[in-house]
Image (spheres, helix red, strand yellow):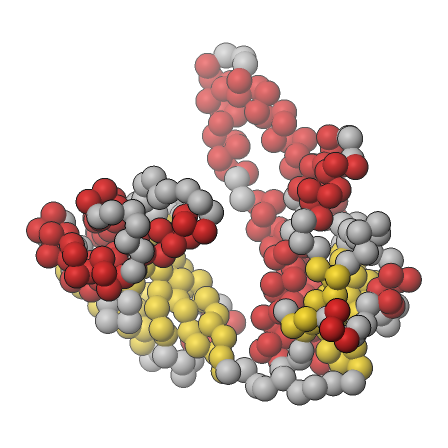
Amino acid sequence: MAIFLTISCKLQLDLAQHQKVENTLAAFSIACTYINEQVDPAVRNKLKLQSLIYHDVRKHVPELPADLVVAVMGRVAESRKSAHERKCRVRRFRPTSASINTKAFRIREADWTVSINLVGGREKTIPLVLGEYQREQLRGRKPVSAVLVCRSDGGVYLQVQVEYPVPEVVPRGQVLGVALGMDTIVVMSTGEEIVREEVGSVRSRYQRVRSSLQKKASKGTRTTRRNCRRVLKRLSGRERRFATWVNHTVSKQVVTKAKDIGAAIALEDLTGVRERKNKRVKVQTERAHINTWAFHQLRSFIEYKAAVCGVGVVVVPSDKKTEGTADSRKAVKIKFRGAACKPA
């Protein structure tokens, strides 16, 4: 059994290399849009797309390397499958990312540089800006794919997927019940609580700042509107990154606790909790608190960290009356309940 981890690696580029990356992303976007317009939307298979339009794409975007043209087929197929599940159509492809297969890039561990096939020629020695965590996850492992991403701040990243072997989950008699909440983030059946009081205050502060700036951006002088939009762009994503960091920290604490006591983890199934709570809550600030609650992300982090450690995870139906308000009494009740529990 194995899982796939995505390691985000920042690229240290000079001006010429940065321009080549932008040209590659633009050509990749043009190729995706061309395929999406020329081929029937009902075709969602990568090999079928490749057999229908591969040579036409090579002629339409001749500067795009053959490896990336094949990756374009995969990107369009994945986007169409995702849109089909959501019952909509793929409208456009933005020049912000490009899928790369293993033939188009290679990471050298000796000096931690990467070689990437780009428009205008292959760049063979691009330095990677890595921390110890990234080096540990990449060392000795063969990447299976990657995505070249240019973020809004101008930074260019290579998001590398590696296959991570995980130990077989050993059946455990003891169960660690975990209740999730918005204020008290986690309460475990052992009585331990994980409270991050700063989460609520940080979210409220960002909400007040956004509301004030958006109001000024719609009124005021031309200079005021431009400055407000610039500040909103600078603040974009900060709250989300903070919430992601908190969820990583909390999930690691939960999995470490379960591993130390030799227990499986039982989690509430909170599917649809926002819709149910929004019907009962009339205050706008409380609804905003509910809608920014990243409970699904926390659950996914717990599941993959538990898989790496060989800890089992099961999902327990939640109590509709008390869901979202973690307390010790409810957490103690979370346990295996025969057929009522299903693997995550």
Q: Give the percent coordinates (x, y) of residue 160.
A: 39, 67
> What residue is shown at x 53% (from left), y 18% (from top)?
218
Q: In this view of the protein, which residue sits in the foreground, 335 or 120?
A: 335
Q: Give the percent coordinates (x, y) of residue 303.
A: 62, 69
Residue found at the very far left of the displayed protein: 59
Residue found at the very far top of the displayed protein: 221
Where 172 sits versus 133, above or below? below
* Res. 39 visible in picture: yes
> What residue is shown at x 22% (from left), y 57% (from top)?
49
* Res. 252 visible in picture: no
> What residue is shown at x 50% (from left), y 12% (from top)?
221
Q: How many marks?
A: 0
Where 188 sits versus 154, above or below? below
Please indicate whether residue 199 sits to the left or right of residue 132 in the image: right
Q: In this view of the protein, which residue sits in the foreground, 40 or 208?
A: 40
The quarter of the rendered structure image containing the C terminus is bottom right
Q: Give the percent coordinates (x, y) of residue 80.
A: 35, 51
Please indicate whether residue 211 sits to the left or right of residue 112 in the image: right
> What residue is shown at x 75% (from left), y 61% (from top)?
317
Q: Give the percent coordinates (x, y) of residue 311.
A: 66, 79
